[in-house]
Amino acid sequence: MIEKRPFGRTGYGSTVTIFGGASLMRGSEKDADLALEVLLKYGVNHIDTAPRYGDAELFIGPWMDKYRKEFFLATKTSKRTYPEAREEIRRSLDRLRVKQIDLIQLHNLGHPDEWDKALGPGGAIEAAVEAREKGWVRFIGVTGHGWMIAAMHKRSVKRFDFDSVLLPYNYLMHLNERYRNEFDEVVRICQESNTAVQTIKSIARGPWGISPQNRNTWYQPLEEQEDIDRAVHWVLGRPNIFLNTVGDVKLLPKVLDAASRFQRRPTDKEMEQLVQRNKMSPLFGIGT
């Protein structure tokens, strides 16, 4: 089975791997059935989805009819104003077939203009707080992508007392000194406030190049089990953080199998071998 860690201040013992609902974005009922079977097999007890993931919420909804108590349920809102975010949160409750969501997250809050709107007067954060007060959600988080998101998250957690953050983290991003320093600082701040830190893009090989896009991911993922093992184990080797799974349901079993066998963090030499063997490149281009 997969290790559990305290999910920040929530009081929930979450598996270190969190199911990413993005893998159902262009999925089918068959894909959803496969995903649920794999999650139950490995004891994954935390789901993260979003309205922007196509029909993912609709596929997850039927799971809640039978397994609601088995999962910490998180979704997101990409809306930036109070009325739009409020409406989207209510819609997610309906689509997920639940009366309460455990975690609502401001989705991909990385652009300064959107940040000002969402966290300012009449912004989405007011809808999230209201939803918490009404019992529609229990906790509030923030997510994002790209080289600058760690710096933006630092601003976010200073503006509002978020219960969780989510951002990219893998070996190649760690090699970028600026991102590494910003990431480390976010983690430090979050540890002080007992805010959960979720990570994404653990098995990203790089942007799609001339290779055919045969996976339900906007990036080219690692595919061999040995390579996935190293990438997953490297992320899980950092204490007190979580790894959100891959955006392709067919790779989900490999990621969870890797997590179930985690014992140690690979060495820098082993990770450099992984990078060279797969000709890996930074997912977001060159960070400055």
Image (cartoon, rainbow, N blue to C red):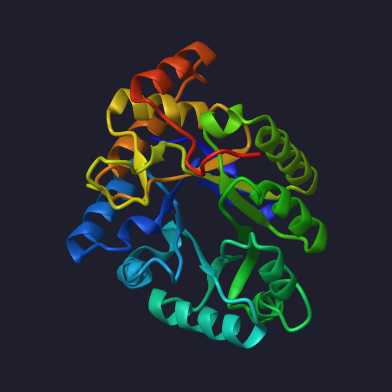
Counting from the top left corner in percent of width and height, residue 97 is at 40, 77
Is 93 above or below relative to 213? below
Q: Residue at x 55, y 72 (%)?
A: 77
Counting from the top left corner in percent of width and height, residue 230 is at 42, 24
Residue 27 in which image quadrant: bottom left
Judge by depth and name the residue closer to the eye, 38 or 189. Answer: 189
Q: Residue at x 39, y 58 (%)?
A: 21
Counting from the top left corner in percent of width and height, residue 245 is at 41, 45
Judge by depth and name the residue closer to the eye, 286 or 110. Answer: 286
Counting from the top left corner in percent of width and height, residue 72 is at 50, 58
Is 213 above or below relative to 54? above
Image quadrant holding the C terminus, namely top right
- Left/right placement of residue 1 relative to residue 79 reads left
Residue 144 in which image quadrant: bottom right
Is 80 above or below relative to 104? below
Q: Residue at x 24, y 46 (%)?
A: 250
